[in-house]
Image (cartoon, grey):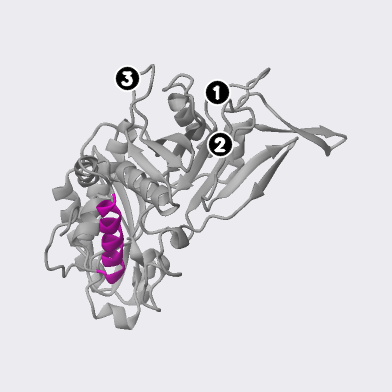
């Protein structure tokens, strides 16, 4: 019996729509690899206790798929490590409840899970407007070429007319379909009204692909730029949860799933937790390195947030378990030291002035999944699983 996904005959092989939710895509896709994802997620839900599983399923079907999926993954991760997990345990001295109380033999710890993106609610709404416009254009796919959206500018707090944009694209499709491949390469056109400006290009496909209708018409999207603020996003997310449970009597672990577009690198994470790196130079040469007192674990004068024993930084999505970021950072000044025990995870620990690493993360092995899961056809590019 399926707990999350609907029981239907699936024939849809189309890629994920720009404005489509992850749940909708995974639920409707007939791609074999997506079927493997559904099977694994359903198997994890079987082990999630009643009645909490019903709430989790409802969240996964709504706009909270990312955060609910991460909680499900963490629950499965701890259970597969031989630990017992209590959902939303009561805490002495506070009415708030963490996501999990995990027992490992005679020891126990609490876990708070959170998922962090890189856009505000207002920015997310604007991105949804753009995504719906892209999907509207994609519906007008024509064989023989792909469209290149060189520029797409939408006025603030405006809603472009999809009808007018589609009319423009249809007319351009008729023009492009009559062009030779050499003409297509130099083609450019512009659409402009009070709400939107689009600069359109195109490029020819191979002879074989020209005989079929592409699954989407946009082959190249406008160039997007991101700025490196991942360390601040991580820091703010942890600080918002650090004091939720006062001074707990057991180790407290905050797990952060970073689902931003680029994701954090090691420099971002270490800067957020231990303080921004400062290089000291003399005569044009680096003569020393120190850290500012602006980290989660230490301010300018003293350790802070000592109630947080460790932070688990992840970037896990349903389709990236083979190479997902999943690393544990210990707080060297924690009131209650956290022992990872039998967890198969990469651990970072400050020893003196040096951050040392031990252990390795292997989520596929932890979840008893084969190397190379999910299985893709040999000719299929990795990213073909998702888009």
Residue sticking out furthest to the left: 8
Q: Is residue 355 left or right of residue 98?
A: right
Is residue 359 positioned above or below 281 on the image?
A: below
Mark sitting earlier along the chain (3/2): 3
Rounded to the nearest angstrom, the CA distance separating label 3 from label 1 is 20 Å
Rounded to the nearest angstrom, the CA distance separating label 1 from label 2 is 14 Å
Foreground: disc 3 or disc 1: 3
Q: Residue at x 47, y 43 (%)?
A: 104
Residue topped by disc 1 = 305
Point out which mark residue 95 bears. Answer: 3
Q: How far across and how far down the image is residue 269, in percent?
A: 57, 39
Q: How far across and how far down the image is residue 6, in percent?
A: 14, 57
Viewer-nearest residue: 297 or 380: 297
Q: How far across and how far down the image is residue 106, in percent?
A: 49, 39
Say whether residue 355 is magenta: no
Q: Quadrant of residue 54?
A: top left
Boundaries of the magenta span: 31-47
């Amino acid at each position: 019996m399926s707990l999350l996904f609907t029981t239907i005959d699936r024939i849809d092989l189309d890629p994920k729509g720009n404005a489509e939710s992850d749940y909708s895509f995974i639920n409707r896709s007939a791609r074999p690899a997506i079927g493997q994802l559904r099977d694994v997620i359903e198997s994890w839900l079987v082990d999630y206790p009643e009645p909490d599983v019903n709430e989790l399923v409802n969240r996964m079907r709504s706009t909270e798929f990312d955060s609910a999926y991460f909680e499900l993954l963490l629950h499965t991760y701890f259970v597969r490590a031989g630990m017992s997990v209590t959902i939303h345990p009561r805490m002495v001295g506070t009415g708030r409840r963490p996501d999990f109380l995990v027992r490992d033999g005679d020891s126990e710890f609490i876990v708070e899970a959170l998922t962090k993106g890189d856009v505000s609610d207002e920015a997310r709404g604007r991105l949804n407007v753009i995504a719906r416009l892209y999907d509207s254009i994609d519906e007008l796919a024509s064989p023989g070429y792909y469209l290149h959206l060189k520029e797409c500018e939408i006025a603030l707090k405006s809603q472009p007319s999809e009808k007018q944009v589609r009319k423009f694209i249809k007319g351009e499709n008729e023009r492009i379909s009559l062009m030779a491949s050499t003409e297509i390469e130099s083609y450019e056109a512009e659409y402009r009204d009070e709400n939107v400006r689009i600069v359109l290009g195109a490029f020819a496909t191979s002879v074989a692909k020209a005989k079929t209708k592409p699954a989407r018409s946009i082959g190249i999207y406008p160039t997007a730029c991101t700025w490196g603020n991942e360390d601040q996003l991580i820091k703010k997310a942890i600080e918002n949860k650090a004091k939720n449970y006062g001074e707990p009597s057991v180790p407290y672990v905050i797990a952060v799933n970073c689902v931003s577009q680029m994701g954090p690198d090691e420099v971002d994470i270490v800067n957020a937790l231990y303080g921004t790196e400062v290089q000291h130079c003399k005569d044009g040469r680096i003569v020393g390195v120190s850290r500012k007192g602006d980290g989660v674990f230490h301010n300018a004068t003293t350790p802070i947030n000592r109630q947080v024993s460790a932070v688990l930084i992840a970037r896990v999505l349903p389709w990236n378990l083979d190479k997902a970021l999943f690393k544990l950072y210990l707080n060297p000044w924690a009131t209650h030291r956290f022992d990872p025990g039998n967890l198969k995870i990469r651990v970072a620990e400050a020893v003196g002035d040096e951050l040392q690493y031990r252990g390795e993360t292997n989520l596929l092995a932890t979840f008893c999944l084969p190397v190379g899961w999910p299985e893709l056809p040999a000719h299929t590019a990795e990213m073909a699983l998702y888009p």
